């Protein structure tokens, strides 16, 4: 088996010089020498042992990526963004799918620690769980939250309040005055920010905030269906619904259709995430779009910077969302 010593002998340099070129630690090595050694490495087809490289750099060159639900079309582009940056920097990504189960999420984090990954990116399900976050911090493995924020944690997210504000303002500008809100789980700070944006838009338009029209639920379609049924059965004056995510919007759409309501003629619906498509009806939802690929890239860059000991203290990178207006919103009757 070819060794670093074989490369050194052919290049007529020391094994230490070859090692430094391989690991991009070329201080004290001229550019001409670096190119010479790299040319010999390429000509010989030498691939350094990952184990040996790890012994030198004290790294495994693996990062963990804990995703809530890989079947959710919101996440694949995010995963691709993480992987693109990881690959460019010589890291392999270990993907863990939690199926939105918090205990499974915590177990995966423990397993990744045991495997001595260099860092972890987590689409955490509960940004308010202080004990969980404290345990993560105490684990001495760099980590970044993606698509969720928490206090004293490095995070990459979208400006959720701004996105919800834009969506609700769009409905107000169309002429809607009685706008319901289908909220997600209270354990999600992301969700709370979206509700805050909804409230802010109503306040600025001098419209009353009716607490009975803010219905708590989950991020699943059945929650959107159930809550929309409650609205349609009890409040005839509601002409629009802001949904905390697109699955809620899908449930709201199905409930409206079941009640004989047309969207958007009878009721307007806005989602959040921009992941839905109903081609059979040639219908597309108005929704708040997030740059998920770029968010994944930024999370990977942030994590690798932390791994490389660059000083990052509780940094939050927030992307601006865009409202995409389509078929599900119009002026009220």
Image: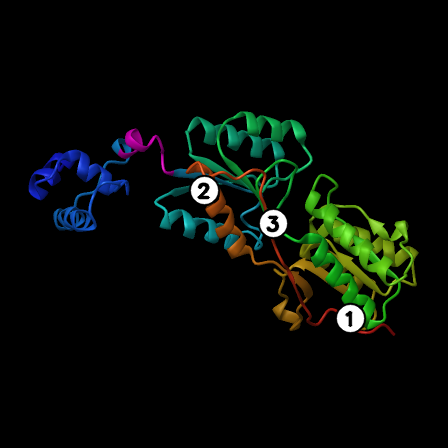
> Who's the residue at 52% across and 36% down the image?
143
Residue 220 picture location, percent across and down: 69, 49
Identify the image quadrant of residue 135.
top right
Distance CA(mark 1)–CA(mark 2): 47 Å
Say whether residue 54 is visible. Answer: yes
- 31 over 99 or under it: above or below: below
- CB under 8 Å between discs 3 and 1: no
Residue 39 picture location, percent across and down: 15, 51
Determine whether the residue tagged by mark 1 lies in a helix, strand or loop.
loop
Front position in the image: 67 or 320:
320
- Identify the residue position indicated by label 2 in the image: 305
Residue 309 picture location, percent across and down: 44, 36
Front position in the image: 55 or 254:
55
Front position in the image: 170 or 77:
170
Front position in the image: 332 or 305:
305
Which mark, by number, is residue 264? Answer: 1
- Please state if 190 lies on the left or on the right of 56 as rendered: right
User: Is-magenta flag for residue 57?
Assistant: yes
Distance CA(mark 3)–CA(mark 1): 30 Å
Identify the image quadrant of residue 4.
top left
- 322 over 77 or under it: above or below: below
Q: Which stretch did the figure color magenta? A: 53-61
Residue 273 picture location, percent across and down: 64, 57
- 135 over 127 or under it: above or below: above
- Please state if 57 lies on the left or on the right of 97 as rendered: left
> Earlier along the polypeptide chain: callout 3 or callout 1?
3
Distance CA(mark 2)–CA(mark 3): 17 Å
> Who's the residue at 47% across and 49% down the image?
82
Say whether residue 267 is visible. Answer: no
> Who's the residue at 86% across and 65% down the image?
239
């Amino acid at each position: 088996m070819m060794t670093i010593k074989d490369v050194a002998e052919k290049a007529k340099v020391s094994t230490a010089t070859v090692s430094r070129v391989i690991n991009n630690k070329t201080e004290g090595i001229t550019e001409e020498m670096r190119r010479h050694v790299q040319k010999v490495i390429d000509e010989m087809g030498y691939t350094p042992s990952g184990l040996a490289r790890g012994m030198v750099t004290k790294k495994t060159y693996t990062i963990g990526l804990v995703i809530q639900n890989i079947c959710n079309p919101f996440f694949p582009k995010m995963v691709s963004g993480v992987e693109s940056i990881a690959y460019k920097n010589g890291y392999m990504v270990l993907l863990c799918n939690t199926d939105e189960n918090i205990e499974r999420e915590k177990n995966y984090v423990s397993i990744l620690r045991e495997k001595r990954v260099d860092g972890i990116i987590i689409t955490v399900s509960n940004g308010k769980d202080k004990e969980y976050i404290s345990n993560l911090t105490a684990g001495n493995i760099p980590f970044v939250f993606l698509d969720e924020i928490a206090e004293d944690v490095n995070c990459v997210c979208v400006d959720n309040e701004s996105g919800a504000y834009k969506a609700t303002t769009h409905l107000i500008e169309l002429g809607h005055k009685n706008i319901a809100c289908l909220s997600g789980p209270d354990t999600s700070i992301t969700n709370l920010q979206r509700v805050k944006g909804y409230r802010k838009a109503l306040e600025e338009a001098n419209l009353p905030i009716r607490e009975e029209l803010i219905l708590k639920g989950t991020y699943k379609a059945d929650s959107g269906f159930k809550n929309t049924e409650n609205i349609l059965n009890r409040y005839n004056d509601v002409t629009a619904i802001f949904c905390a995510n697109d699955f809620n919007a899908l449930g709201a759409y199905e409930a409206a259709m079941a009640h004989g309501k047309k969207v958007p003629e009878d009721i307007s619906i806005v989602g959040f995430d921009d992941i839905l498509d109903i081609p059979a009806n040639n219908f597309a939802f108005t929704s708040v779009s997030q740059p998920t690929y770029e968010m994944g890239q930024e999370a990977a860059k942030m994590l690798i910077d932390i791994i490389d000991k660059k000083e990052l203290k509780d940094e939050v990178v927030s992307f601006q969302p865009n409202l995409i207006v389509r078929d599900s919103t119009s002026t009220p009757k």
